[in-house]
Image (cartoon, rainbow, N blue to C red):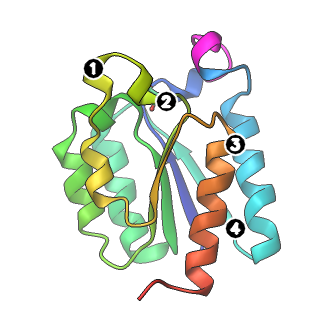
Amino acid sequence: KPLMVLNGPNLNLLGRREPEIYGTDTLADVVRLCERTAAPHGVTIDARQSNHEGQLIDWIQEAREHHAGIVINPAAYSHTSVGLLDALSACDGLPIAEVHLSNIHRREAFRHHSYVSAAASAGVIVGCGVQGYAFAVERVCGLLKTPLS
Ligand code: DQA
């Protein structure tokens, strides 16, 4: 089964959007990095991005049945969406890693809390830029080989 890499709103603009915060790498660069990281583990990447909360929820429900794990940057919905939290919480047993490019704890107070983190069974990576996606993919691939008890 592939690993789903989900990106939320405005991340289609990555590389052009506030580059002083999010860097100059594009979403296509992120996807290539994920693929390169997963390949040695024999894992393929199914990468998707949407600006729409309901679309992300539909894809999480799809991942529940058809994917080995989820790496998700929920972007702004991290801070607002009980719907995303509930969808991820319904994926019991799937390793889920949450990624934020920026260190949300060094930013505005409204970014300090993520609803999604409560469902991030494989951990949360913040403030490592695009490298955070590689860490998350590495982490989930490792858990697929050696699950935590
Ligand atoms: C983000 C942080 C969020 O607060 C913000 O809304 C984003 C990107 C990050 O990757 O640093 O869109 O998730």
Identity, as a three-letter code, of the amino acid under mark 3: Gln
Q: Residues within 10 Å of mark 2 (few under 14, many from 20)?
A: some
Q: CA distance from mark 2 to mark 4?
A: 28 Å
Residue 95 image point, x, y percent:
45, 70
Q: CA distance from mark 1 to mark 3?
A: 24 Å
Q: CA distance from mark 4 to mark 1?
A: 36 Å
The region drawn magenta spans 14-21
Q: Quadrant of residue 27?
A: top right
Secondary structure under tag 4 reads loop
Which residue is labeled 1 in the image? Answer: 109
- Pointers 3 and 4 in contact (CB under 8 A)? no
Secondary structure under tag 3 reads helix
Which residue is labeled 2 in the image? Answer: 103
**The magenta stretch spans residue 103:** no
Q: Residues within 10 Å of mark 1 (few under 14, many from 20)?
A: few
Which residue is labeled 4 in the image? Answer: 44
- Which mark is nearer the camera, 2 or 3? 2
Instruction: Write the residue at 48% across / 23% down.
Output: 10
The answer to whether residue 30 is above or below residue 112 is below
Q: CA distance from mark 2 to mark 1?
A: 12 Å
